[in-house]
Image (cartoon, helix red, strand yellow):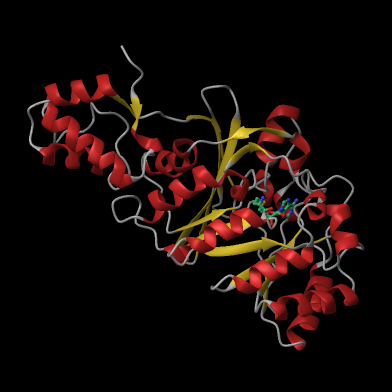
Amino acid sequence: MSARVNLLDLSPADAELALREFAVAQGEGAYRGSQAARHLWASPVATFEAMSDLPAAFRARLAEHFELPRLGLSAHQESTDGTRKFLFRMHDGQAIETVAIPDDGRLTFCISSQAGCPLACAFCATGAMGFARNLTPSEIAGQVRELALLDPPLRATNIVFMGMGEPLMNWKSVDTVLTILNSPKGFGIGARHITISTVGWLPGIEALALRPEQFRLAISVHAPSDALRATLMPVNIKFPLDDVIAAAATFDRRVTFEYVMLGGVNDQPEHARMLAALAKRCRAFVNLIPLHPGGAMGFTPTSPSEIAKFARTIRGLGVEVAIRKSRGMDIAAACGQLRVERLARRRPATADEDREVQIP
Ligand code: SAH
């Protein structure tokens, strides 16, 4: 038998087309194909067998020709603040993380785009584990699908590509996944509720800019000068800050800067002034992120009062700024931490390390 077609690697339109053609070839009405397509993303079920609105014989033939691969759930943790973290294992044994963060009536999924990451940012747990491979569309969108298959289901209102990996280095897959997430025949999540976070991988920013939908772009800046940024983010040598800011300035939608606060490293008043100047060049909104201590070898978090002061300096210069709340501190819910913890069997940070900082 030839290999079965993985329907979850296709855009919803292509999957529906393939299913409609298959239905007709099987002597069924084409609408049976559309019925099956709805069960991939819009009202997902785990197997063809579970598509109970289809005739049993047709379901059996679907299962012979197509596949709906699952991601194996190998760990699950829930924080006292309601944040839930999932560790999925791929068919080749690679592990990736997905985090579900409830806030104010929203449910944001933080999803992974690569197994590991090649970029080795100094403060990042994923960077420390090295790069294994790109994820396929079905492995990325599958994270959202798996949580929708839970009982009770978790349905994302917002998606951020802030889990493991650099999404714009895996553009081919991410391109398809954006369609799956946003399409009314996919998850139907509004483009403005989907954020791609990047170190500033320029070819990917250009590709994203060509998409007509209003997907949001977040740039991991983390240092306001090339000299400092290159010590924290080796990618800065390939794509220097100036070029990244220029790309952000030509991006036709509002950009967010991500800036993780590293005690004594990038949190001084002159850094705030330089960061505000960069933000002005591309009309960016600045998000200050308290450092998640797990996995961030050799760095200490900036104190909440110092972060607030840094934010006031930026705001005083006329740039919009917010301080991100740290979530899931008791479950090691920062980029790459659950996987690192599983592999190294470390204890997670305790809940009382959690500090929620209000926007000043
Ligand atoms: N590669 C992409 C997306 C994944 S990381 C990017 O770099 O943007 C998502 C965000 O988490 C990035 O801004 C990253 O710098 C940040 N991050 C990584 N480690 C962190 C830590 N220990 N504490 C706080 N934020 C961290």
Residue ID at (49%, 62%): 210
Residue ID at (78%, 52%): 238
Foreground of the two, 268 or 281: 281
Foreground of the two, 241 or 144: 241
Give x and y (percent) for residue 274.
83, 76
Name the quadrant of the N terminus: top left
**Horizontal side, residue 215 vs residue 349: left or right:** left
The quarter of the picture where residue 357 lies is: bottom right
Name the quadrant of the C terminus: bottom right
**Horizontal side, residue 274 vs residue 91: left or right:** right
Against 248, residue 197 (above or below) is above
Residue ID at (12%, 41%): 31
Give x and y (percent) for residue 53.
14, 36
Give x and y (percent) for residue 96.
59, 36
Foreground of the two, 207 or 28: 207
Can residue 327 be spotted in the picture? Answer: no
